[in-house]
Amino acid sequence: MARMHTRRRGSSDSDKPAADEPPEWSDVDADAVEDRVVELAEQGHSPSEIGLKLRDEGVQGTPVPNVKLATGNKVTEILEANEAQPDLPEDLRNLMERAVRLRDHMDENPTDYQNKRALQNTQSKIRRLVDYYRGDELDEEFTYSYDTAVELLDLE
């Protein structure tokens, strides 16, 4: 699959090893994993950070290699069930943070044309994601702008 904003090609995605059940050495209780996921979300961690923390630190001293195999649900599904999901989807939030950083850089360095192009590409990706999420996870009237991004991210 070709990359979005360059002429190079790259692998589209990597595949996880096929597994139907958690490994034998990972003997954790599904309820304990769900409680830890909700606890980490309340501390302000994103779903990907929660997965990394569970992999590295584990629950009750036992690492959790895959939350879905341990509980039957993904991290985001657990958060939705416990009404602890973030306001913005994680991929959109990360792109907005990048766009705000690039915009601030462009205000200080107006002749940095390479970063101007990077900002345009990032804003293009944001608009496409907003179109994808509009109606489901975002309001129907939501449109992206620098001011709304700063407001949503609380970066003032």
Image (tube, grey):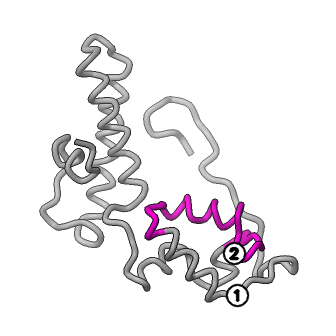
In this view, the residue in front, 85 or 114, is 85
> Is residue 43 highlighted in magenta?
yes
Please provide percent x and percent y for residue 140: 16, 67
Residue picked out by circle 2? 59
Q: Left or right: where does residue 114 sit relative to residue 51?
A: left
Q: CA distance from mark 2 to mark 1?
A: 9 Å
Please provide percent x and percent y for residue 41: 47, 69
Q: Left or right: where does residue 81 sit relative to residue 50?
A: left
> Is residue 49 highlighted in magenta?
yes
In this view, the residue in front, 19 or 79, is 79
Amino acid type of the residue tagged 2 in the rendering: Val
Crowding at dot 2, Cα within 10 Å, few <14 / some 14-19 / many 20+, comes out as many
Element under label 1? loop
**Which residue, as the protein is rendered here, is positioned at the far right?**
24
Please provide percent x and percent y for residue 131: 26, 58
Question: Which mark sits nearer the N-terminus, 2 or 1?
Answer: 1
Residue picked out by circle 1? 29
User: Is residue 155 depicted above or below 55 in this figure?
Assistant: above
Identify the residue at horizontal 56%, vertical 64% (top origin): 50
